[in-house]
Amino acid sequence: MKRKSILLLAALMLVMSMFLAACGGKEKTGTETKPKEEKTKTDDNGSEAKDGGTLIFAVETAPEGIFNVNFYGNASDADVLNFIDDGLITYDEKMKPIPNIASWETTDNKVYKFTFKKGVKWQNGEELTVDDWIFAIETLANKDYDGPRYSNVKDIEGAPAYHDGKADTISGLKKIDDYTIEITFDKARVNNLENLWTSPLSRKEFEGVAVKDMMASPQVRQKPIGTGPFKVNKVVPGESIELVRNDDYWKGKPHIEKIILKVIDPTLTIGELKNETIDMTPFAPVNYPEVQKLTNVNVLKSPGVSYYYVGFRLGTWDGKKNVANYDKYSNKQLRQAMAYALNREEWNEAFFFGLGHPVNRPVPSSHWIAADNSELPNAYEYNPEKAKQLLDEAGYKDVDGDGFREDPNGKKFVVNFGHYQTANPTFEARAKQIGQYWEEVGLKTKVTMTEVNLYYDQLEAGDKAVEVFFGGWSTGADPDPSTLWKTDALWNYPRWVSPDSDKLLEDALNVDIVGTDEAKRKQLYVDWQKLFNEEVPAIPISELDDTYALTKRVHGVELRPLGLNNASEWWLDQK
């Protein structure tokens, strides 16, 4: 079975991108607020920050439209939320938590006392108090909550009882006054703070709205409010979102007057940047070589906290936990063979243009717990002959002579591989290439492309069209993988059930076992990565550098592993 050169395919896509872009050229603690007049900023040349102007921020995927941080579930909505909402805590460049709106203290990692800044206002003019945080936590713990973040509050003392309807309040929440709250967890853990949900929800704004109706409400879909530097003014679904400056922002009035989030075809990115019809955008790796050539554009690049993987459906979600009841990919040798069949070096170079790097663990290298490749039992370097050997040993052989393998029972075997679809021109090609690798070792593969929002609905529902699937995660500041890979994790999309995995992850958070010894905690995570690497419930395939392109009229923007700095610090040269 011959295959087209993947590098030639990538080159053709790059030519297509350049052509379309050219066509597009004719036409992404203290307690007091700092006084606004004290806010000054200069760029690298010493120029003072200017107020005013409109920034056009381009994105390639239209937001789903869930514009409240307590309910959203994908990166396209996060593009909006980053502008309109602030969390109670934030993270430094080493991804360690630091105070933002709230500071904290604890002596035992079980009981935490939080103190809010006074005078922080919601965008409806109401003052933020601890009641709004209590409201958020109670909402996430409510049995009718249909968002994905109960896992971030379930470890609070009394939250499970509240969730199950056995209590009217959460016993671990103790309001001291409007700006002070004490939170008690069910037990001491190393990462209780990092895992805790720290985004309030306006009690006033959602007054009278039942929890089951919140996600579909106008307060979430059309008229969201937050505590951030910009507020939503106008939503044109699928096209654009207009954000206007929050003059009462608690950190001081932002410099930029208006931000327009504009949805564009990524093949037009180069032309729009060149002509400055957009000011700033994350961009697809396929555009990286051409973006670098633009003399009016600066490129920001940082190691990210995201990775891509190919997952195997191993079970189903029963509403509370994953259950290992799907046998098609239960054979470890089959999964390992499919890993060895992938030429990940070639694939990353072809589709990520130097911005993607093969990885053998579901932990980005940016995190301090990341295992070194030398510590892992398998490197999974491209080895189609080893893949064939493993398949033979596992009983997957070509019985009928058609060039493709049957399963150990002699029945037809087809890999049903799903990948999400957006306007990105590389997605279908990269999915088909993965399928081609598997076909080269005799595994017949059917590739299905599905619109991105529907795709993740299918994953959660256990749709058999995506029994092998392409996925990706941005892991956030807390390196602990529990919320993605434990047996009780909704986002454990392979539905991997492993008592050994659960114990390692639990031990790594157990204060009685690791105390404050980071080396001891890391070793447990390394042991977990070894287990994952050997069992292969998913094939880690790539970790990415984050990249943004911005025209030289944009100043004050910084990119770190956890994303962009606060947009209130950005400013524009006026056109």
Image (cartoon, rainbow, N blue to C red):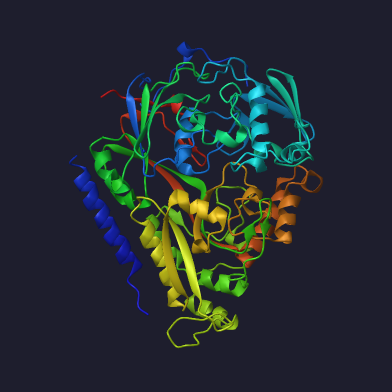
Q: Where residue 395 sits: x, y (%)?
A: 58, 82
Q: Identify which residue, 359 or 323, lies in the foreground.
A: 323
- 76 relative position to 339: left or right: left
- Determine if residue 346 is in view: no
Residue 86's place in the image compared with 379, above or below, is above
Q: Identify which residue, 389 or 313, lies in the foreground.
A: 313
- In the image, farthest residue toward the right: 512
Q: The C terminus appears in which quarter of the rendering?
A: top left
Residue sitting at 39 percent across and 44 percent down? 61
Residue sitting at 41 percent across and 28 percent down? 556
Q: What is the number of callouts on the image?
A: 0
Q: Identify which residue, 306 or 483, lies in the foreground.
A: 483
Q: Which quadrant of the structure image shows residue 3?
A: bottom left
- 47 relative position to 15: left or right: right
- Determine if residue 266 is in view: yes
Q: The N terminus appears in which quarter of the rendering?
A: bottom left
- 277 relative position to 500: left or right: left
Residue 197's place in the image compared with 340, above or below, is above
Q: Identify which residue, 552 or 533, lies in the foreground.
A: 533
Residue sitting at 62 percent across and 39 percent down? 145
